[in-house]
Amino acid sequence: MTVTYSSKVANATFFGFHRLLLRWRGSIYKLLYREFVAFVSLYAALSIVYRLILAENEKRYFEKVSLYCDKYAEQIPVTFVLGFYVTLVVNRWWNQFGNLPWPDRLMFLISSVVHGKDERGRLLRRTLMRYVNLTSLIILRSISRAVHKRFPTMDHVVEAGFMTSDERTIYENLKSPHLKYWVPFIWFGNLAAKTRKEGRIRDGIELQLLMNEMNRYRSRCAILFGYDWVGIPLVYTQVVTLAVYTFFFACLIGRQFLDPTQGYPEHELDLYVPVFTLLQFFFYAGWLKVAEQLINPFGEDDDDFEINWCIDRNLQVSLMAVDEMYMNLPKVQKDIYWNDSDLRPPYTAAAADYCIPSFLGSAADKTPMSKIRIRLYCDSPLSRPPHFEEHPSIRCLSSQMKTSHLVL
């Protein structure tokens, strides 16, 4: 659902954003086209009635109403209320993304402090990690419609492997009117304490680190639940929505092109199509649509968070980290810079332009580029830029090595 376009705007180019304007998925056109068609249709209908159906005396009355609506519509503070509202919604949206529960810190810690390569050690690490993922699933299932569609009942949670049948029985036998997302955390704490007694967590400091990290993870889950519970006050949303819709309802009448022969101020032309009013509708109503899409990022809109992907990723990565990768280390070897203190990782020829001198302060002497030592991959499949081919001072010091020092 998330629409990613970072690669399209990696570099600033001439009219660089124009390529984004033609995309449909996640676009303002997809969000707004129904309202836009409705506004244009109502405007055209009123224009036809004014021009072809009303009698002359009725036209004069309509023109007075139109001038009145045009005069006072500008007093509605649409820009003011929309600006504050959208800023609030975007900040709230980004804070929710920043509090998505990622188990990476816990999986690093569990893999480090819960010891034992035997079956018991493996079982303890995987179970602790599964409780962590189960908690986030219970929270996300309660706030995300997409996740709830995937796991509509606890049967689906058990079938997916987040919970065993025995755990489900214990979970459902706990009578509480509140969401029981905290239950797996209690299991986590009790199992961690038991692991400490077994000596697989070697001291109290490691246990404390583990519990502190678990509490940090729990806080993120609770924050997401709080965001879902306490939204932006309804009155604020109502004020913004009414301000936008009232303004454009007034524009339907006030922005009509009136008979130029009547000599009304600013009505010397009859262009039929109110281009700038339509643009104003596109910008203001589109602004409101931005807030409408971002106010709850756990829905099913194009730009909502990919929560189901997060669930899949977190479970797979965390179980691999505490099980398959436990004490699975590569051979420790000397690095290629073992005897070189003045090291510089190599550049491909295509990336050589990015080799710049170190910043030593704005008042320091500038090191000329001709004094910089650049290390290139001699066998790079990338072609050299033109200035490398033409520069007479570039030379490969050792054609037998895969990398060599080049001096500019």
Image (tube, helix red, strand yellow):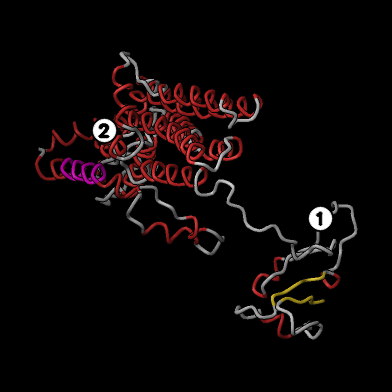
User: Is residue 134 inside the magenta stretch?
Assistant: no
Identify the mark at residue 249; answer none if there is no mark. Answer: 2
Which of the 4 image quadrants contains residue 164? Answer: top left
Rendering coords of residue 151 (x, y %): 28, 36
Q: What's drawn in magenta, residue-wise?
A: 34-47
Q: Is residue 29 above or below residue 378?
A: above
Q: CA distance from mark 2 to mark 1?
A: 58 Å
Identify the mark at residue 325; answer none if there is no mark. Answer: none
Rendering coords of residue 221 (x, y %): 45, 28
The disc, 2 or 1, on the residue closer to the chain's N-terminal end is: 2
- The answer to whether residue 214 is seen in the rendering is yes
Q: Is residue 259 left or right of residue 163?
A: left
Q: Could you classify mark 1 by the number of other residues whose Cα lies within 10 Å: few (under 14), some (14-19), or many (20 or more)?
A: few
Count numbered badges in the picture.
2
Q: Which one is closest to the eye, mark 2 or mark 1?
A: 1
Q: Is residue 356 left or right of residue 278?
A: right
Q: Could you classify mark 2 by the number of other residues whose Cα lies within 10 Å: few (under 14), some (14-19), or many (20 or more)?
A: some
User: Is residue 46 inside the magenta stretch?
Assistant: yes
Mark 1, residue position: 359
Between 322 and 74, the one nearer to me in the picture: 322
Rendering coords of residue 240 (x, y %): 37, 27
- The answer to whether residue 90 is seen in the rendering is no
| Residue type pointed to by label 2 | Phe
Q: Is residue 238 above or below residue 288?
A: above
